Image (spheres, rainbow, N blue to C red):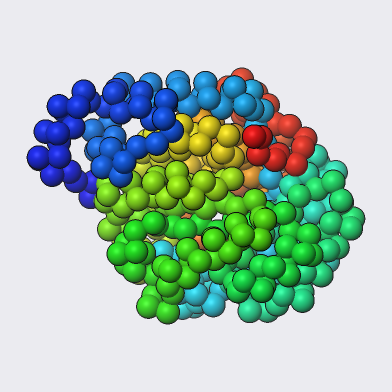
Amino acid sequence: MRLTCRRQIGNIFRMTGGVRSIIEKLSQKHSLSKEEYALLITERDQEAAALLRELAVTERKKIYGNDVYIRGLIEFTNNCKNNCLYCGIRRENKKADRYRLTAEEILSCAREGYELGFRTFVLQGGEDPYWTDDLLCALVKQIKAERPDCAVTLSVGERSFESYKRLREAGADRYLLRHETASEEHYKKLHPESMSFSNRMDCLKNLRSLGYQVGAGFMVGSPFQTASDLACDLKFIEEFSPQMCGIGPFIPHKDTPFANESAGSVELTCFLLSVIRLIKPNILLPATTALGTLDPKGREKGILSGANVIMPNLTPVADRKKYALYDNKICMGEESAQCLSCVQKRLDAIGYKTVVSRGDIIG
């Protein structure tokens, strides 16, 4: 990843007192300029990362203690009408092994998850034209009717205002829509011309206006990304103030135009998790599967950097490997109960615990 900084900006940075002064400002004000965010990234070192981690964990513990929220992830379709250059389930990937769960299969996953202690279900899929508003609304209503004490989160991409409105009225509580990058120029390098940066941003605003708890997020180390691009992402999170932010390192997929690009950095991702925790202390911040894919201790490192959400997979084992947004995705072959047990043991080892609740944002 090309994280560059002009010499004159670096000189200004040194004159202002260095990384520590910027971290202290962020901790106190929960806000920086784009230039300061960029300098924090380019001039970071192990000492800065350690200070950020300490401050981020302190902020999180004030609000959430040692609790880690669990979400039951149900990846219900890998069909997608879009052709994003980085994504393994992109429309033009003819090698993808396509699948689509039935409504009854999704309900079965949710029932199983409920018995395991999940109280939030995340229905995630590609932008699959099969799943019309009528079908999705009926599904959400059924889940809420069976389990009224649970939260339903949708992550099904860009839809119209009316579609989001109907899904909200059907009972959907939360919506995850990664913005992927807050730089329009960078966005164009990651997506086909048929997709629009302005539409992505409009979708997030529409979701907010309809009363959803909204999740945004971005890739770390995606092709062509600069420190300035990441600074735009951090400033966007600061100003838009989503209830949740999902970030993870970019990982290439062998059947995409970015197959030969380098993966993102676990170290930088964890650094940015700490930054985001200080920007918005009560944010819901996942330690993502992508972290665990690149590093066997990646999710633990995420929690120790300020994250407080883990999303074990409830998708039927036979279909999990087909939802391949990137290569070598972890946790392919475990049953849901095994997966949750593994997560709990690993969190116990670092002094954290999963909790049985909807996992709502506090404050």
Please indicate whether residue 216 sits to the left or right of residue 141 in the image.
left
- Residue 17, image x, y percentages: 21, 23
The reply to whether residue 344 is in sight is no
Front-lying residue, 230 or 352:
230
Q: Is residue 220 above or below residue 58?
A: below
**Which residue corresponds to the image point at 34% horizontal and 59% vertical from the top-left?**
183
Image quadrant occupied by the C terminus: top right
What number of labels is visible? 0
Quarter of the image for residue 11 reads top left
Q: Which of the two residues, 307 or 330, is positioned nearer the viewer here?
A: 307
Q: Residue at x 71, y 35 (%)?
A: 341
Q: Please name the residue shown 66% across and 55% down the image.
A: 212
Q: Residue 238 in the image: state x and y as whole percent.
A: 45, 43
Q: x, y percentage for residue 266?
A: 40, 39
Answer yes or no: is residue 208 visible. yes
**291 left or right of 233 in image:** right
Residue at left offset 80%, top offset 48%:
150
For this rendering, which residue is in front, 132 or 46? 132
Q: Is residue 186 above or below residue 292?
A: below
Asked if residue 139 lies left or right of residue 95, the reply is right
Q: Quadrant of residue 71?
A: top right
Question: Residue 74: horizontal and vertical position, in percent?
Answer: 69, 56
Q: Is residue 110 left or right of residue 83?
A: right
- Residue found farthest to the right: 146
Q: Is residue 116 above or below residue 164?
A: above
